[in-house]
Image (tube, rainbow, N blue to C red):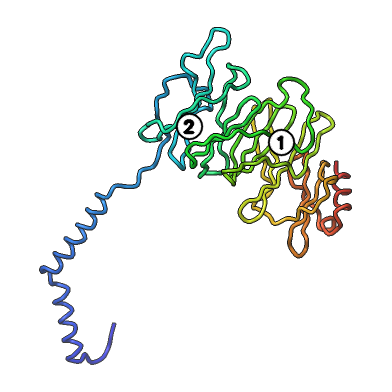
Amino acid sequence: MIRGHLSPMFLLIALFLMVACTDTGTTSNTSTSGTEDSTATAAEEPATPTLTPPDCQINTEVLDGNRVWVKSKDLLAVIKADEGEANEEMGPSHRTLEILDGRSCEQKFQTKLPENTSPDFPYYIAEIQYNNISNIIGIQGFYKVIICDLEQNYKLTELKPAFFTEREYDDPQSGMVQRLEVWEDYLLGYTQDLGAFAFDLSDRNAPKAVLPFAEWQDPDNSRYHSMFLLPTEGGVQAILPFYDAEEDNFMLYPLFDEPQQVSDQITQSARNNQFLVLRKQDEARTPLAIDLGARDLVALPANIAAKNTQDILKWMRAQQ
């Protein structure tokens, strides 16, 4: 409560405010009408539609996994059976690549891929991992890899996997491409008996094979464990691809939570062991201990991390 003498000026102001508050004339109606109009206009504006996967009808057989939506381009990529090429002995030949508009289902591109070693061997479209803006479609053949560049008029390029060391082909299935995936500007895959491979697709006009930075062959089952150091925004990421044939599961295993700046000054002879130590390019030259067999980083006690690389490797081997 306010106590004391009320001046005439104060009473005049109070009277003015009371009149203003009780005025329900044109100004108030106009303001209300304007608010209603704004609300109505906002309600009438269409919301941005959420894209849903295409529901295009394909006129021939499509194998599981051979219908892939490239969401960034809203394109549907399909590998389908070739009409009129099936025979009683071998069945259909799945080597027609078709690209359709994701909304209208209009055909944007179609081509017949070269024979895949045998007429009955199908091609498969690679999955897209860790990348929502891919403009490349990877295609898995029996021994070969093909990429389709969506930004260069659907240009097709055939690529040949390369490996860390010379490989021995035990039987006709050795070297068969078992899985293929796109990761950022890279294409990573796995072959039977020969292990992992990678391609750098950053230069669309000159894609090239990438060799592993390190690789160890498990003496128990002769499996190759490869680690790729792939440049990406903010440094490099270490990728250790692994294919579980029993589960038909292909995993990429990125080692770092975020890209790291590391030194790659390691002799070739030190890169073919189960254990590897990389050094960060920080003032402390922080060690990153890696177990290629486990496809994981090894946590180092503080007193071990302070030692030189050879002592760290000796400690890692002693933990087995």
Mark 2 or mark 1, earlier in chain: 2
Quarter of the image for residue 197 reads top right
Amino acid type of the residue tagged 1 in the rendering: Ala
Question: Is 15 placed above or below 270 here?
Answer: below
On residue 77, the disc is 2
Q: What is the quadrant of the N terminus in the image?
A: bottom left
Residue under the point 86% across and 57% down: 308
Q: Which amino acid does the dot numbered 2 rest on? A: Ala
Observer-nearest residue: 246 or 95? 95
Q: Which residue is mark 1?
A: 162
On the rendered structure, is 41 left or right of 194?
left
Q: Residues within 10 Å of mark 1 (few under 14, many from 20)?
A: some
Q: Position of residue 38 (x, y in %)?
A: 23, 58
Task: Indicate whether 258 appears above or below 92.
Answer: below
Which residue does the image show at 66% across and 55% down from the upper left?
A: 235
Residue at 60% x, 29% y: name it: 140
Mark pair 2, 1: CA separation? 27 Å
* Residue 8 x, y percent position in the rendering: 17, 91
